Amino acid sequence: MGASKLVFLYALAAVLSCSCGGAKGKHAAREYSLGEDVRVGSLSYHVIEAEWKSQLGEGMLSRSPQRNFLLVRLSVTNGGSQSVSVPQLSLENPSGESYSENMEGAGIPNWLGYIRSVAPAQTEEGNLLFDVPTNTYRLKLTDPDDPESKAAWYINIPLTFNPTGPDPLPIPPIPQQ
């Protein structure tokens, strides 16, 4: 094989490896911060805020969590030409454990609901409820237009507390040895 062909093959291999690396980087960039707009299929999600609650409601109608309630307020806009159902969402902690939405709407202010559909060019806004240990999380989004896809987009939910409301249940101390 001539030197010019060998140089050509090395150059071709370098170009192909760079283009493949770019595709991988594109998939890795599917992580967003709270407050950013995230386009997934025909839907755009915007997490407005996340708030920890030690209970929902008041008096005889109050609800206590098994761990801690986390209300995630978001808006969902349909940029498509047909109504789209918003799938059930989940949270993942840094260890990869997943927590599904709590679908009991009692005591949740402005609950987004269990069955939710967004008409074309419309926006729905409301709260999702999770019962999770105190931690940082990522809200996992999937493409409602392609339910078979394994692709996911994540919105980071930092661990912050509401200074005007009740704090979540305390984290138990680590036993000393």
Image (cartoon, rainbow, N blue to C red):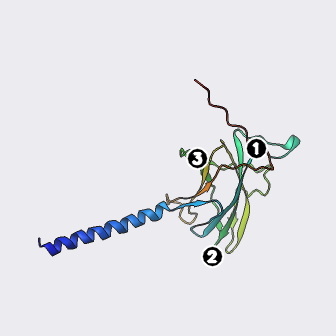
Q: Which residue is mark 3?
A: 93
Does the image show residue 58? yes
Asked if residue 105 lies left or right of residue 85, the reply is: right
Image coordinates of residue 3 in percent, x first then y, are 14, 72
Q: Which residue is mark 2?
A: 81
- Is disc 2 surrounded by few (<14), some (14 to 19) or many (20+) residues within 10 Å? few
Asked if residue 11 lies left or right of residue 106, the reply is: left
Assign the N terminus to one quadrant of the image. bottom left
Q: Residue furthest left?
A: 1
Is 99 located above or below residue 48 in the figure? above
Kind of residue at disc 3 = Asn
Is 99 located above or below residue 123 in the figure? above
- Is disc 1 surrounded by few (<14), some (14 to 19) or many (20+) residues within 10 Å? some
Disc 2 on helix, strand or loop? loop
Disc 3 on helix, strand or loop? loop
Mark closer to the chain start, 3 or 1:
3
Report the Cα–Cα distance between label 3 and label 1.
Answer: 19 Å
Kind of residue at disc 2 = Ser
Q: Nearer the viewer, residue 9 or 148?
A: 9
Q: Are marks 3 and 1 in contact (CB under 8 Å)?
A: no
Q: Which residue is mark 1?
A: 167
The residue under the point 79% across, 45% down is 166
